Amino acid sequence: MQTKRNIIIFVVVALLCGWLGVVIDRFIPEQPNGDTLGMGIWLVTPLLATIFLRAFAGDGWRDMGLTLNFKGNGKWYIVAFLIYPMTTFLLLSFGYLTGWIDFSNFNIQAITSAFVSVFFIQFIKNIFEESVWRGYLTSKLLQLKLNDFWLYVTVGGVWGAWHIPYFLVFLSDSDIASVLPVNRLTFAIIGILTMIVWTIMYTEIYFMTRSIWPLVLMHATEDALINPLMLDGYIQIAQGKEFFVSPTAGIFTTLLYLMIGLGLRVIRKKST
């Protein structure tokens, strides 16, 4: 009962904190775009909630996944690091062959430099994010012995729904347009579905390592590689083809991640 209660408390706080940030920003109009107090509240509150629940509500600290567990799991660290670069390479190759992606502004040196310059910052940021979504929510739901697919949908759904204020308010119109030519509500729906699919990969690697660190590595690689690739204009996708080959949320991209996640699940099931 305690675990269920604390999960409900966490989910409610996570889903409401972004809207609290939106309200606060209404009273402080002059703030840097993309770096507002409300956005900071949205980012930090889930972590503060997990700390409170672990310290004062009986959850404890033993299942946080903070140990490296590197022995015997080194291959999963390598897999975690390579998933996003390899899928992006396959997608860009497909886009090149079909002519759906324009590489006129593609500059591997500039992309590598951008990746290196932001990777460490993204790594630090994702320590906090993965300690919440895998280190807390996933680990607590495991105690309830949910079916794997219910676990994917629950964690991915809450993770995605936490982003709704970001999709609908905090994220700029130009950033949305660089990913998909849709309105904010449609973008939010696609974003949630994408995160549910991503959750399969993250959960399976967490199952096999019982550590958040390969997930921090994977998440940081995604943020440092794909976001600059799209937002800084190194590639341009042909009109109408974004829905298929967007490196963030295209149909082909999402299917690749789905196959990887389910493939990891098969490997885990065989190994156990």
Image (cartoon, rainbow, N blue to C red):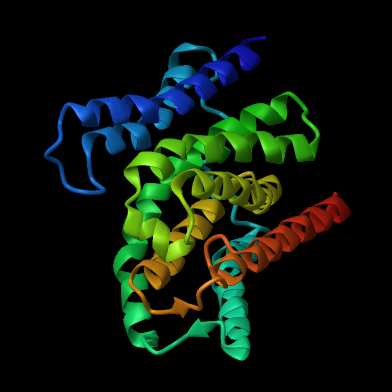
Quadrant where the N terminus sits is top right
Horizontal arrangement in the rendering, residue 24 relative to residue 126 (left or right) = left
Residue at (51% x, 26% y) in the render = 61
Q: Is residue 11 visible?
A: yes
Residue at (75% x, 62% y) in the render = 259
Most extreme residue toward the top, as rendered?
1
Horizontal arrangement in the rendering, residue 240 relative to residue 118 (left or right) = right
Residue 223 percent coordinates (x, y): 43, 60
Residue 86 percent coordinates (x, y): 60, 75
Relative to 185, residue 138 above or below: above
User: Can you tell which quarter of the image residue 62 is in?
Assistant: top right
Q: Is residue 64 visible?
A: no
Residue at (57% x, 73% y) in the render = 241
Residue at (48% x, 18% y) in the render = 53
Residue 139 percent coordinates (x, y): 63, 33
Horizontal arrangement in the rendering, residue 106 relative to residue 199 (left or right) = left
Nearer-the-camera pick, 64 or 8? 8
Relative to 124, residue 82 above or below: below
Relative to 3, residue 71 above or below: below
User: Can you tell which quarter of the image residue 170 is in?
Assistant: top left
Horizontal arrangement in the rendering, residue 53 relative to residue 166 (left or right) = right
Nearer-the-camera pick, 50 or 255? 255
